[in-house]
Image: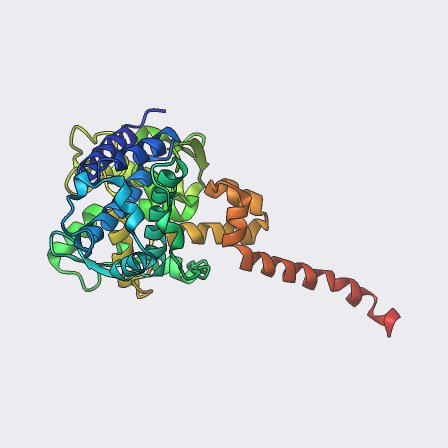
Protein backbone atom coordinates (compact mmCIF):
# COMPACT_ATOMS: atom_id res chain seq x y z
CA UNK A 1 0.00 0.00 0.00
CA UNK A 2 1.43 3.34 -1.08
CA UNK A 3 1.79 5.88 1.73
CA UNK A 4 3.90 8.95 1.02
CA UNK A 5 3.15 10.39 4.45
CA UNK A 6 4.86 7.50 6.24
CA UNK A 7 7.94 7.85 4.04
CA UNK A 8 8.03 11.60 4.65
CA UNK A 9 7.75 11.09 8.41
CA UNK A 10 10.44 8.40 8.38
CA UNK A 11 12.89 10.65 6.51
CA UNK A 12 12.00 13.67 8.68
CA UNK A 13 12.44 11.80 11.99
CA UNK A 14 15.61 10.03 10.83
CA UNK A 15 17.15 13.44 10.09
CA UNK A 16 16.09 14.65 13.55
CA UNK A 17 17.82 11.66 15.18
CA UNK A 18 21.01 12.33 13.22
CA UNK A 19 20.90 15.99 14.27
CA UNK A 20 20.49 15.08 17.95
CA UNK A 21 23.35 12.57 17.73
CA UNK A 22 25.65 15.48 16.84
CA UNK A 23 25.03 16.83 20.36
CA UNK A 24 25.63 13.49 22.10
CA UNK A 25 28.90 11.68 22.87
CA UNK A 26 30.26 9.82 19.85
CA UNK A 27 29.68 6.45 21.51
CA UNK A 28 25.90 7.11 21.68
CA UNK A 29 25.65 6.30 17.95
CA UNK A 30 26.32 2.62 18.76
CA UNK A 31 23.19 2.48 20.91
CA UNK A 32 20.98 3.98 18.20
CA UNK A 33 22.43 1.63 15.58
CA UNK A 34 21.50 -1.23 17.94
CA UNK A 35 17.91 0.07 18.21
CA UNK A 36 17.63 0.39 14.44
CA UNK A 37 18.95 -3.15 13.92
CA UNK A 38 16.30 -4.39 16.35
CA UNK A 39 13.72 -2.70 14.08
CA UNK A 40 12.59 -0.31 16.80
CA UNK A 41 10.31 2.23 15.10
CA UNK A 42 11.78 5.57 14.10
CA UNK A 43 9.27 7.38 16.35
CA UNK A 44 10.42 5.40 19.39
CA UNK A 45 14.07 5.98 18.52
CA UNK A 46 13.41 9.70 18.24
CA UNK A 47 11.75 9.71 21.68
CA UNK A 48 14.81 7.94 23.13
CA UNK A 49 17.09 10.47 21.42
CA UNK A 50 15.22 13.39 22.99
CA UNK A 51 15.36 11.75 26.43
CA UNK A 52 19.07 10.88 26.22
CA UNK A 53 19.86 14.42 25.07
CA UNK A 54 18.16 15.82 28.19
CA UNK A 55 20.40 13.60 30.33
CA UNK A 56 23.63 14.77 28.70
CA UNK A 57 22.53 18.40 28.88
CA UNK A 58 22.03 17.85 32.61
CA UNK A 59 25.43 16.17 32.84
CA UNK A 60 27.15 19.11 31.14
CA UNK A 61 25.92 21.32 34.01
CA UNK A 62 26.92 18.90 36.79
CA UNK A 63 29.90 19.61 39.01
CA UNK A 64 32.02 16.63 37.93
CA UNK A 65 31.38 17.09 34.20
CA UNK A 66 31.28 20.86 33.59
CA UNK A 67 34.76 20.90 32.08
CA UNK A 68 34.02 17.99 29.76
CA UNK A 69 33.11 18.33 26.10
CA UNK A 70 30.02 16.11 25.85
CA UNK A 71 30.76 15.26 22.23
CA UNK A 72 34.18 13.78 23.05
CA UNK A 73 33.27 12.44 26.50
CA UNK A 74 35.07 9.09 27.11
CA UNK A 75 32.53 6.36 27.82
CA UNK A 76 34.46 5.25 30.93
CA UNK A 77 33.50 8.56 32.55
CA UNK A 78 29.98 7.17 32.95
CA UNK A 79 31.34 4.77 35.56
CA UNK A 80 32.01 7.78 37.82
CA UNK A 81 28.30 8.54 38.19
CA UNK A 82 26.91 7.96 41.68
CA UNK A 83 23.38 7.25 42.96
CA UNK A 84 23.39 10.84 44.23
CA UNK A 85 24.08 12.13 40.69
CA UNK A 86 21.18 10.16 39.29
CA UNK A 87 18.77 11.22 42.01
CA UNK A 88 19.77 14.79 41.20
CA UNK A 89 18.89 14.06 37.57
CA UNK A 90 15.41 12.89 38.60
CA UNK A 91 14.92 16.19 40.44
CA UNK A 92 16.25 18.07 37.40
CA UNK A 93 13.77 16.57 34.93
CA UNK A 94 10.80 17.63 37.08
CA UNK A 95 11.39 21.19 35.79
CA UNK A 96 14.28 22.25 33.56
CA UNK A 97 15.17 24.88 31.00
CA UNK A 98 16.11 24.02 27.42
CA UNK A 99 18.87 25.88 25.51
CA UNK A 100 16.26 28.29 24.10
CA UNK A 101 15.24 29.32 27.62
CA UNK A 102 11.90 27.48 27.51
CA UNK A 103 10.80 25.79 30.74
CA UNK A 104 9.85 22.12 30.47
CA UNK A 105 8.14 20.12 33.21
CA UNK A 106 7.46 16.41 33.63
CA UNK A 107 4.90 14.70 35.80
CA UNK A 108 5.53 11.20 37.16
CA UNK A 109 4.73 9.51 33.83
CA UNK A 110 7.11 11.80 31.93
CA UNK A 111 9.88 11.22 34.45
CA UNK A 112 9.31 7.46 34.34
CA UNK A 113 9.69 7.46 30.54
CA UNK A 114 12.94 9.42 30.67
CA UNK A 115 14.33 7.10 33.34
CA UNK A 116 13.31 4.05 31.28
CA UNK A 117 15.16 5.50 28.27
CA UNK A 118 18.25 6.09 30.40
CA UNK A 119 18.15 2.56 31.82
CA UNK A 120 17.94 1.11 28.32
CA UNK A 121 20.86 3.29 27.20
CA UNK A 122 23.13 2.28 30.08
CA UNK A 123 22.10 -1.38 29.95
CA UNK A 124 23.22 -1.61 26.32
CA UNK A 125 26.72 -0.36 27.14
CA UNK A 126 26.98 -2.49 30.29
CA UNK A 127 25.71 -5.69 28.62
CA UNK A 128 28.14 -5.19 25.74
CA UNK A 129 31.11 -4.54 28.09
CA UNK A 130 31.70 -0.89 27.18
CA UNK A 131 31.46 -0.07 30.91
CA UNK A 132 32.04 -2.21 34.02
CA UNK A 133 29.17 -0.80 36.08
CA UNK A 134 25.60 0.21 35.34
CA UNK A 135 24.83 3.32 37.39
CA UNK A 136 21.32 3.63 35.94
CA UNK A 137 20.39 0.33 37.61
CA UNK A 138 20.68 2.18 40.95
CA UNK A 139 17.89 4.65 40.16
CA UNK A 140 14.95 4.26 42.52
CA UNK A 141 11.56 5.24 41.19
CA UNK A 142 8.07 5.27 42.58
CA UNK A 143 5.49 2.97 41.04
CA UNK A 144 3.09 4.82 38.76
CA UNK A 145 -0.53 3.96 39.52
CA UNK A 146 -2.49 2.60 36.57
CA UNK A 147 -4.55 5.24 34.82
CA UNK A 148 -8.26 4.75 34.66
CA UNK A 149 -9.63 4.65 31.12
CA UNK A 150 -11.27 8.00 30.45
CA UNK A 151 -14.11 8.05 27.96
CA UNK A 152 -17.03 10.17 26.85
CA UNK A 153 -20.65 9.28 27.46
CA UNK A 154 -23.30 9.57 24.72
CA UNK A 155 -24.36 13.08 25.70
CA UNK A 156 -20.76 14.33 25.59
CA UNK A 157 -20.25 12.77 22.15
CA UNK A 158 -23.44 14.45 20.90
CA UNK A 159 -22.37 17.81 22.34
CA UNK A 160 -18.91 17.51 20.80
CA UNK A 161 -20.25 16.76 17.33
CA UNK A 162 -22.93 19.48 17.56
CA UNK A 163 -20.34 22.11 18.50
CA UNK A 164 -18.68 21.76 15.08
CA UNK A 165 -21.65 23.20 13.21
CA UNK A 166 -22.70 25.65 15.97
CA UNK A 167 -21.95 29.32 15.26
CA UNK A 168 -23.35 31.03 18.34
CA UNK A 169 -20.93 33.57 19.79
CA UNK A 170 -18.66 33.57 16.74
CA UNK A 171 -17.58 36.74 14.94
CA UNK A 172 -18.30 37.22 11.23
CA UNK A 173 -14.73 36.18 10.36
CA UNK A 174 -14.97 33.12 12.60
CA UNK A 175 -18.27 32.13 10.98
CA UNK A 176 -16.71 32.31 7.51
CA UNK A 177 -13.81 30.14 8.68
CA UNK A 178 -16.20 27.68 10.33
CA UNK A 179 -18.12 27.37 7.05
CA UNK A 180 -14.87 26.23 5.45
CA UNK A 181 -13.74 23.69 8.06
CA UNK A 182 -16.89 22.18 9.56
CA UNK A 183 -17.25 19.31 7.07
CA UNK A 184 -13.60 18.38 7.53
CA UNK A 185 -13.76 18.56 11.32
CA UNK A 186 -17.02 16.60 11.46
CA UNK A 187 -15.44 13.89 9.29
CA UNK A 188 -12.37 13.67 11.55
CA UNK A 189 -14.36 13.46 14.78
CA UNK A 190 -16.82 10.94 13.35
CA UNK A 191 -13.95 8.84 11.99
CA UNK A 192 -12.06 8.77 15.31
CA UNK A 193 -15.20 7.97 17.31
CA UNK A 194 -16.48 5.43 14.79
CA UNK A 195 -13.28 3.45 14.16
CA UNK A 196 -11.00 3.95 17.18
CA UNK A 197 -8.08 5.00 14.96
CA UNK A 198 -5.01 6.49 16.58
CA UNK A 199 -4.57 10.13 15.60
CA UNK A 200 -1.27 9.28 13.88
CA UNK A 201 -3.13 6.74 11.74
CA UNK A 202 -5.79 9.33 10.92
CA UNK A 203 -3.35 12.00 9.70
CA UNK A 204 -1.55 9.41 7.55
CA UNK A 205 -4.64 8.62 5.48
CA UNK A 206 -4.73 9.40 1.76
CA UNK A 207 -7.92 9.63 -0.32
CA UNK A 208 -7.10 6.35 -2.04
CA UNK A 209 -7.11 4.60 1.36
CA UNK A 210 -10.88 5.07 1.67
CA UNK A 211 -12.99 2.34 0.06
CA UNK A 212 -16.68 3.29 0.17
CA UNK A 213 -17.85 0.11 -1.58
CA UNK A 214 -16.35 -2.13 1.09
CA UNK A 215 -16.78 0.53 3.80
CA UNK A 216 -13.20 0.25 4.95
CA UNK A 217 -9.93 2.12 5.34
CA UNK A 218 -6.53 0.78 4.33
CA UNK A 219 -4.18 2.03 7.02
CA UNK A 220 -0.63 1.79 8.31
CA UNK A 221 -0.85 0.91 11.98
CA UNK A 222 1.55 1.63 14.80
CA UNK A 223 4.66 -0.44 14.06
CA UNK A 224 4.14 0.02 10.28
CA UNK A 225 1.69 -2.90 9.99
CA UNK A 226 -0.75 -2.70 7.09
CA UNK A 227 -4.33 -3.20 8.22
CA UNK A 228 -7.99 -2.69 7.31
CA UNK A 229 -10.47 -0.79 9.51
CA UNK A 230 -14.19 -1.01 8.73
CA UNK A 231 -16.73 1.75 9.25
CA UNK A 232 -20.49 2.16 9.30
CA UNK A 233 -22.96 4.51 7.59
CA UNK A 234 -22.36 7.52 9.89
CA UNK A 235 -18.64 7.54 9.13
CA UNK A 236 -19.25 6.89 5.43
CA UNK A 237 -21.66 9.82 5.18
CA UNK A 238 -19.32 12.24 7.01
CA UNK A 239 -16.35 11.26 4.83
CA UNK A 240 -18.34 11.48 1.59
CA UNK A 241 -19.69 14.93 2.48
CA UNK A 242 -16.19 16.21 3.26
CA UNK A 243 -14.55 14.70 0.16
CA UNK A 244 -17.33 15.87 -2.16
CA UNK A 245 -18.01 19.34 -0.78
CA UNK A 246 -15.29 20.32 1.70
CA UNK A 247 -11.85 19.06 0.71
CA UNK A 248 -11.35 21.18 -2.41
CA UNK A 249 -11.73 24.35 -0.31
CA UNK A 250 -8.26 23.66 1.13
CA UNK A 251 -6.48 23.55 -2.27
CA UNK A 252 -3.72 21.03 -1.42
CA UNK A 253 -0.09 21.72 -2.27
CA UNK A 254 1.63 19.38 -4.72
CA UNK A 255 3.41 17.36 -2.03
CA UNK A 256 0.21 16.63 -0.09
CA UNK A 257 -2.25 16.44 -2.99
CA UNK A 258 -3.27 12.89 -1.97
CA UNK A 259 -3.73 13.61 1.74
CA UNK A 260 -7.25 13.01 3.03
CA UNK A 261 -7.30 15.71 5.70
CA UNK A 262 -5.83 19.09 4.82
CA UNK A 263 -5.02 22.21 6.82
CA UNK A 264 -5.68 25.84 5.95
CA UNK A 265 -2.00 26.00 4.96
CA UNK A 266 -2.85 23.57 2.10
CA UNK A 267 -0.79 20.80 3.75
CA UNK A 268 -1.60 17.46 5.35
CA UNK A 269 -2.97 18.00 8.84
CA UNK A 270 -0.63 17.02 11.66
CA UNK A 271 -1.24 15.28 14.97
CA UNK A 272 -0.98 18.51 16.95
CA UNK A 273 -3.52 20.27 14.70
CA UNK A 274 -6.13 17.60 15.39
CA UNK A 275 -5.39 17.63 19.12
CA UNK A 276 -5.96 21.40 19.25
CA UNK A 277 -9.05 21.12 17.06
CA UNK A 278 -10.70 18.60 19.40
CA UNK A 279 -9.79 20.63 22.46
CA UNK A 280 -11.38 23.72 20.87
CA UNK A 281 -14.68 21.97 20.19
CA UNK A 282 -14.74 20.30 23.61
CA UNK A 283 -14.34 23.68 25.26
CA UNK A 284 -17.02 25.16 23.01
CA UNK A 285 -19.35 22.26 23.88
CA UNK A 286 -18.84 22.86 27.59
CA UNK A 287 -17.42 19.40 28.30
CA UNK A 288 -13.98 20.63 29.35
CA UNK A 289 -10.71 21.00 27.49
CA UNK A 290 -9.49 17.54 28.53
CA UNK A 291 -10.97 15.75 25.50
CA UNK A 292 -8.21 14.30 23.31
CA UNK A 293 -8.00 12.07 20.22
CA UNK A 294 -7.05 9.20 22.53
CA UNK A 295 -10.23 9.76 24.50
CA UNK A 296 -12.17 9.34 21.26
CA UNK A 297 -10.34 6.03 20.80
CA UNK A 298 -11.13 4.96 24.37
CA UNK A 299 -14.78 5.90 23.83
CA UNK A 300 -14.91 3.65 20.75
CA UNK A 301 -13.27 0.77 22.63
CA UNK A 302 -15.60 1.19 25.61
CA UNK A 303 -18.72 1.22 23.46
CA UNK A 304 -17.56 -1.83 21.49
CA UNK A 305 -16.86 -3.78 24.67
CA UNK A 306 -20.20 -2.86 26.19
CA UNK A 307 -22.00 -3.99 23.05
CA UNK A 308 -20.02 -7.19 22.50
CA UNK A 309 -18.50 -8.17 25.85
CA UNK A 310 -15.64 -9.60 23.74
CA UNK A 311 -12.14 -8.45 24.69
CA UNK A 312 -10.64 -10.23 21.69
CA UNK A 313 -12.86 -8.25 19.34
CA UNK A 314 -11.84 -4.98 21.05
CA UNK A 315 -8.15 -5.94 20.89
CA UNK A 316 -8.47 -6.67 17.16
CA UNK A 317 -10.38 -3.45 16.42
CA UNK A 318 -7.91 -1.28 18.37
CA UNK A 319 -4.94 -3.23 16.98
CA UNK A 320 -3.47 -3.88 20.42
CA UNK A 321 -0.32 -5.98 20.41
CA UNK A 322 -2.02 -8.59 22.61
CA UNK A 323 -5.34 -9.12 24.34
CA UNK A 324 -3.52 -8.62 27.65
CA UNK A 325 -2.99 -4.98 26.72
CA UNK A 326 -6.73 -4.66 26.19
CA UNK A 327 -7.45 -6.49 29.43
CA UNK A 328 -5.30 -4.02 31.40
CA UNK A 329 -7.16 -1.06 29.91
CA UNK A 330 -10.65 -2.48 30.25
CA UNK A 331 -10.26 -4.53 33.45
CA UNK A 332 -12.84 -2.43 35.34
CA UNK A 333 -15.37 -2.95 32.56
CA UNK A 334 -14.63 -6.67 32.60
CA UNK A 335 -15.72 -6.67 36.24
CA UNK A 336 -18.94 -4.93 35.18
CA UNK A 337 -19.55 -7.69 32.65
CA UNK A 338 -19.06 -10.32 35.37
CA UNK A 339 -21.52 -8.52 37.65
CA UNK A 340 -23.99 -8.34 34.76
CA UNK A 341 -23.61 -12.09 34.22
CA UNK A 342 -24.23 -12.74 37.91
CA UNK A 343 -27.34 -10.55 37.82
CA UNK A 344 -28.65 -12.35 34.74
CA UNK A 345 -28.08 -15.75 36.34
CA UNK A 346 -30.20 -14.69 39.32
CA UNK A 347 -33.26 -15.06 37.07
CA UNK A 348 -32.96 -18.81 37.64
CA UNK A 349 -34.03 -18.29 41.23
CA UNK A 350 -36.90 -15.98 40.25
CA UNK A 351 -38.42 -18.80 38.20
CA UNK A 352 -38.39 -21.13 41.18
CA UNK A 353 -39.38 -18.66 43.92
CA UNK A 354 -42.67 -20.45 44.57
CA UNK A 355 -40.94 -23.79 44.91
CA UNK A 356 -38.30 -22.42 47.30
CA UNK A 357 -40.88 -20.64 49.47
Question: Foreground: 207 or 43?
Answer: 43
Residue 112 shows in this picture: yes
Residue 133 at what x, y percent from top left?
37, 46
Residue 343 at what x, y percent from top left?
68, 64
Total tally of numbered discs in the picture: 0
Q: Is 218 on the left-hand or right-hand side of 23? A: right
Q: Is 126 on the left-hand or right-hand side of 60? A: right
Residue 205 shows in this picture: no
What residue is at 83 percent from the left and 66 percent from the top? 352
Q: Is 317 on the left-hand or right-hand side of 334? A: left
Which picture quadrant has residue 339? bottom right
Question: Foreground: 335 or 45?
Answer: 45
Farthest right residue? 355
What residue is at 45 percent from the left and 37 percent from the top? 230
Q: Is 276 on the left-hand or right-hand side of 224? A: left
Q: Which quadrant of the rendered structure holds the C terminus?
A: bottom right
Q: Is residue 290 above or below residue 219?
A: below
Residue 172 at what x, y percent from top left?
12, 57
Amino acid sequence: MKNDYRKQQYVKNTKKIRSILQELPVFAADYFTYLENREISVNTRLSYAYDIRVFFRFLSQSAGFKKENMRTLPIKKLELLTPSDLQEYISYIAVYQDPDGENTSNKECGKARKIASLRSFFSFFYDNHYIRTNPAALIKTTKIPKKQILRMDKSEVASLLSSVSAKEGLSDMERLYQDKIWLRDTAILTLLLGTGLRVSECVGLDIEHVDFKKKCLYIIRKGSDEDVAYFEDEVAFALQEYIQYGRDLFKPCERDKNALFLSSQHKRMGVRSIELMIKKYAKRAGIGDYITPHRCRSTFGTNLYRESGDLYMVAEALHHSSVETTRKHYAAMEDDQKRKAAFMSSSLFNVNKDIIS
